[in-house]
Amino acid sequence: MSKQSQLEQIIRPAVEAAGFEFWGLEYLSQGKHSILRVFIEHENGINVDDCAEVSHQVSGVLDVEDPINGFYNLEISSPGMDRPLFTEQHFAMYVGEDAELRLSFPINGRRKFKGTIESVNNGKISLLVDGEVHEIDVPQVEKAQLIAKY
């Protein structure tokens, strides 16, 4: 089981018990400067008090489970306008929107893609990049986020 999956299994129930949707997480292992970033969502939006409440809940669970060796900073955040996309359902919610994707291994020598999400079916994302559609398997996506339109 990956570190991401292990952390999600521990953190998701704490977030949901506090009344929020678990959107996803990022764990950046960087020695003393490691970061565990948890994204939460709610139909009424997210404010600072919500983040503080979830931080308290998640900290308690992490203290008991102790899944991370060493020092790290816990950050609780709304996904925001340029929200990260973690699941097939996330990609499907934003068909027609622009996104940036970084893959875990290259397709035709390329790992980074920036384009419009055309469709999502059976674990594959169709991404329109410069007039060409690329089929990308969701598990191959290492990191993805919407491109915010300001």
Image: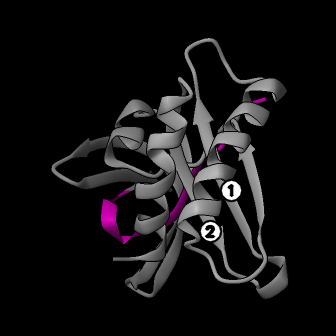
Q: Main secondary structure of the magenta part?
A: strand
| In this view, 96 is above or below 10 | above
Image point 72% across, 43% down: which residue?
55
The boundaries of the magenta stretch are 133-150
Residue 108 falls left or right of residue 58: left
Using the rendered view, name the quadrant where residue 135 is placed: bottom left
Q: Please, what secondary structure does the residue beneath circle 2 have?
A: strand
**Numbered-mark total:** 2
Q: Position of residue 1 (x, y in %)?
A: 33, 77
Cα–Cα span, label 2 and label 1: 6 Å
Amino acid type at circle 2 is Tyr
Q: Would you name the residue on which mark 1 appears?
A: 37
Judging depth in this view, the residue of 108 and 144 nearest the camera is 144
For the C terminus, give its image quadrant.
top right
Residue 116 falls left or right of residue 55: left
Contact between labelled residues 1 and 2, with CB atoms less than 8 Å apart: yes
Q: Position of residue 22 (x, y in %)?
A: 50, 39
Q: Position of residue 136 (x, y in %)?
A: 32, 63
Q: Would you name the residue on which mark 2 appears?
A: 27
Considering only order in the chain, which callout, 1 or 2, is on the residue closer to the N terminus? 2
